[in-house]
Structure formats: C-alpha cells, structure tokens
Image (tube, helix red, strand yellow):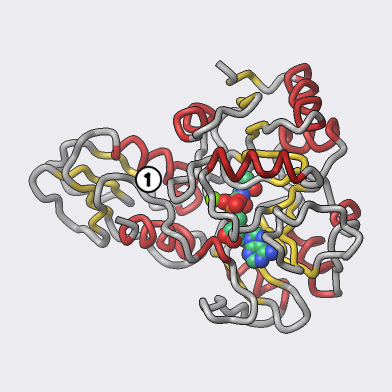
Amino acid sequence: MPVVHATEEAIAKAAQALARGETVAFPTETVYGLGANACDAHAVAKVFAAKARPRFNPLIVHVPDLTAAETYAEFDATACKLAEAFWPGPLSLVLPKRPDSGIADLVTAGLDTIALRAPDHPVAQALLAEAKLPIAAPSANRSGRISPTMASHVEAELDDIPAMILDGGPCPLGIESTVVGVTGDAPVLLRLGAVPREAIEAVLGQALPLANEDAAIASPGQLERHYAPNTPLRLGATDVHTGEALLAFGPNAPQGAVASINLSASGDLEEAAASLFASLRQLDDTGAKAIAVMPIPTNGLGEAINDRLRRAAKAR
Ligand code: TXA
Ligand code: MG
C-alpha cells in the first residue's frame, strides 16, 4: 500500500520520488493533489495518465510563496495584492507565464498563462521545501469525479497508483481553491472555491465577475463533466422520497431517508464545505436510488458549495 503517514522521513522520500520523475499524492488545505515536478514533461504526463485527464486542461503549479511564484509568472500590482492577501491559502492565480519559466508546456496545456498557488498546509509546505521544485498538482481524483479529501479516497480513484500517497488526515477546507485570472484586463473569477468571492472583492475594491465560457480567458477545467457521484442528485429537497438518501443542512432535516448525513446541523457553511465531498462519497456508496440535497444558502462559501452540487447533479 503506498499510503503512508506524512512523517518527516516520508516527506523526504516523497521529495526524492518527485526529483526522480515519479508522482506523489499529498494533502493541501483544500483537497489532495497528485503532484509531479512541473519542469519534467515526462513526470507531468504520468499525472494526466493516472487521472485520465484531457490534455487541454492545464494544471495548477504549487509553490512555497510569492517570491518563488515570481520565477514563473508576471505579477502586476493586482496579482501582488491578491497573493499578499491570500497566500499561503486556497487562491490560485492565472497569470502571464514568463517565457523563461522552465515549466513543461504540458502543465499549461500550451497556453501562455500559468495557474499558481502557495498552499497553506504543513505537509504540502514541507514537501515543497524538501523537493525545491515547483509541483504541478491537480486534485488527485479520476477526471470528472469528486475531489479527494482523505488519503483513502486517492487510492480508490486513480488508474495508476502514485509512488507514495502522503496521509495528512482529512483536508481542513474540503473544497478546491478559488481560481482568479489576472492577465492584464480586469480580474475575473475562473472557478468558485474555498476563498469566497466577497473576500476577494473586498481586497480588490471592485466586483469580481465570473468568466463565461466564451471569455477571452477561461478555465478549461470548468467545461468538462465534473464532480460527479454515480447516484443522481435531487437539489433543493425539503422532503425525502422513498428510497432516497439525504444530504441535510441545518437543524430541520426531514426523516425517512435510507441514509442521512447532515453537512452542518448548526448551518455553518465552513463546516459544510469541509465534509461535502466525503459525505457525497459516503451516500453514493449506500445504493440509494437518489440523494436528496437540502437547500444551502448562497452567501460566502455557499456559492462554491452550490456550484459543486449543481455540477454533480448535472453530470450524469
Ligand atoms: O485546491 C486546488 O486547487 C487543488 C489542490 C490540489 O491544490 N487543485 C485543483 O487542481 O483543484 P485541478 O487541476 O483539479 O483544477 C485546476 C483548475 C482547472 O479548472 C483548470 O482548468 C484551471 O485550474 N487552470 C489551470 N491552469 C489554468 C490556466 N492557465 N488558465 C485557465 N485555467 C487554468
Ligand atoms: Mg480537479
């Protein structure tokens, strides 16, 4: 079994595996990533193969901090402001790639932009410090499936098992990073995620519109079938039909489901985000005919939670 506790020794071995061109799964504060040396095209190709990921969908490159990030991309004043406000943390910035970045073309799917983020997780930071490499890492799930928030999910997902899966426990935030494009024009929101839109707008002092699919800059990953459990989802449910499982939210969960998980009985959106993907996996495994999902508010993190649920409901 390649799952190992993320001890200092295991992290050192994982760093060596990355340097040898192998892949390593590791925890971040959002979800588990499947990492490879971003400068090694052959290693990056293994990531695409393990996930069965389309080659047009570029990867996020993980770096320790803003100084490291500036080696790979051009930061204008807006990009600096966002990195200073949110790094380390769950914000990915899509920026103009430096021509001398040394990043493999496969990582950016041939685009002249690159997505960068400095993760706020001790294991991810220790791995970056040991490896001294930029780490290209998509979520460690099969393409089109729910992102893993525990080491055991990773093992169940991938076509090719990575050299190591570093187990750092459940991911504290549980939803992927927010992706923002800052490529010269006004910044755009490319993917809703763990940093609420309002928090970014507060730093920018302006509205952050969601990019539409035909925008000049788009997030190719948003186009694909995504975040799908096998069981159909019924959103906005206030009751339970025969044979359904229930994904509840808040204090007034209806009775009668074949299985039931409450994302947050007190109605806390952070608590709900943290257990969203693991709960969907668990209910997906119950054999229920459908998963009834109670309404979830759309403020703060609720916007990203509703985005993922909509995609999961549409994906079949
Ligand atoms: O929280 C996260 O972001 C996790 C952890 C592991 O860091 N990673 C993650 O990676 O969710 P992934 O590959 O599943 O999603 C990356 C998203 C995709 O929607 C992709 O299309 C977009 O970022 N992206 C990457 N590079 C881009 C670029 N140059 N331009 C536009 N979108 C880009
Ligand atoms: Mg993903």
**For this rendering, which residue is in front, 18 or 152?**
18
Which quadrant does the C terminus fall into? bottom left
Extreme left residue here? 242
Question: Could you tell whether 18 is left or right of 258 in the image?
Answer: right
Quadrant of picture, ligand 1: bottom right
Q: What percent of the width, then of the height, locates residue 166? A: 64, 26
How many dots with numbers?
1
State the residue at coordinates (65%, 25%). Answer: 163
**Residue 158 visible in the snapshot:** yes
- Residue labelled with disc 1: 263
Q: What percent of the width, then of the height, locates residue 261? A: 30, 40
Extreme front residue here? 42
Residue 13 vertical position relative to residue 96 in the rendered view, above or below: above
Question: Could you tell whether 315 is left or right of 219 in the image?
Answer: left
State the residue at coordinates (69%, 44%). Answer: 44
**For this rendering, which residue is in front, 124 or 156?**
156
Say which quarter of the image contains residue 96. Answer: bottom right
* Mark 1 beta carbon near ligand 1 (under 8 Å): no
Badge 1: how crowded within 10 Å, few (<14), some, or many (20+)? Answer: many
Residue 17 vertical position relative to residue 275 in the rendered view, above or below: above
Residue 68 vertical position relative to residue 160 in the rendered view, above or below: below
Three-letter code for the amino acid on which mark 1 is drawn? Leu
Say which quarter of the image contains residue 133. Answer: top right
State the residue at coordinates (62%, 41%). Answer: 47
State the residue at coordinates (55%, 31%). Answer: 160
Q: Secondary structure at mark 1?
A: loop
Q: What percent of the width, then of the height, locates residue 243? A: 11, 42
Question: Could you tell whether 129 is left or right of 193 in the image?
Answer: right
**Residue 178 visible in the snapshot:** no
